Image (cartoon, grey):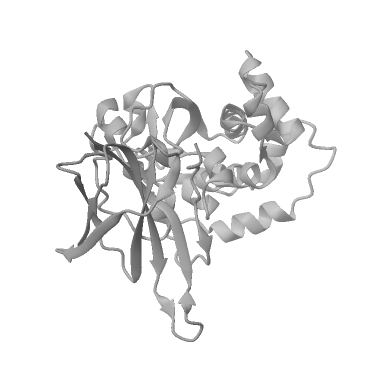
Amino acid sequence: MNIKTTVFSGLVFCLLSVNLFSQEVNYEKIERYIDSISIDVSYESFENLAKALVRPNWAEIEKAYGVYYWITSNITYDSIGFANNKWARYSDVYKIAYDTYKLRKGVCVGYSYLFKFMCDEIGVKAKVINGYSRTETYEAGMPVENSNHAWNAIYVDNKWGLVDATWGKILSINKRYYFLTPPDEFILLHFPEKPEEQFTKRNTVKADFDRYPFISSLCFEIGYCKDYPKNGLIIANKNSAEISVPNPDNMLLVLRIFDYSEDKWKTQDYTTTYLNKQTTFKISLKKKGRFLAELTAIQQYDPMEMKPTSIYRSLMAFTIINK
């Protein structure tokens, strides 16, 4: 199946950092400080490194970000190790964190425990959360059957906040997005095994999570998707399907369709209407079966260059069933 998610191409024009916590954080200052530290043999353990990374007068949220920034800047995702199940053979969570640090590579469980143990050393309360994640467009509107991911929560400013160092490293155009991500955005692609660890204002249940479209975090990073659709499974009626999404500012939405029966992207007839701040696509399907509808956003054309300044692929995806 050749429908792997392409996150984006082009120039990034607007990165939003929504801080739901009371303390303002000077992220750039922390990043400059971390980048200035020489990591040499004196930091044979991540415990010693954690203490060296932060300054005593930093607030807890600043210390936690210092650790997060170092991990996302220095630990490479081990795609080969994931593919051959290397990290699943560990039974000792400290050992997996230690090897992730020493090898400078790992998978989500290593990222999460390394972050947790380093936070322990600097006095920041942190825990590892295991749960379900949606990472590919073809999972839109479909149940996520198995718990397949690990991330963190930290307790700062008298409340829990969500952190995903793994995705901050490999999926985000701005690694800061997955540090204290707004819970109502985080829940779209992460559902914890313990529902109380979602920390959202509304209590999302697993059945709701399974029905969500695929909505890339890029949607929120560029300031789109604040009022995202909740249903990712579209049942066609008489060879016709409709998808409604919010109108993006200064961007054109383009739809493409993947035909599972032929295992390829195909051109489908559709019309587009704009009403009440919504864009609605009415799709004419030429045969029965299962399809994937994927949205790309093209930012306004640069009048001088006569080309789009940014193209954002795979922002949203929906599964369509035509019976």
In this view, 190 is above or below 277? above
In this view, 31 is above or below 82? below
* In this picture, residue 86 sits left or right of residue 265: right
Question: Residue 196 versus residue 238: which sits nearer the camera?
Answer: 238
What residue sits 36% from the left and 28% below the top?
197
Which residue is at the far right?
Answer: 41
Q: Position of residue 166 (x, y in %)?
A: 56, 38
Q: Position of residue 115 (x, y in %)?
A: 59, 34
Question: Residue 168 versus residue 283: which sits nearer the camera?
Answer: 283
Quarter holding residue 111: top right
Which residue is at the far top?
Answer: 91
Q: Position of residue 100 (x, y in %)?
A: 69, 30
What residue sits 72% from the left and 26% below the top?
99
Q: Position of residue 294 (x, y in %)?
A: 37, 50
What residue sits 41% from the left and 66% below the top?
298
Question: Residue 246 versus residue 256: which sits nearer the camera?
Answer: 256
What residue sits 39% from the left and 45% below the top?
258
Which residue is at the far bottom?
Answer: 304
Q: Give the tally of numbered discs.
A: 0
**Residue 277 at least partly seen:** no
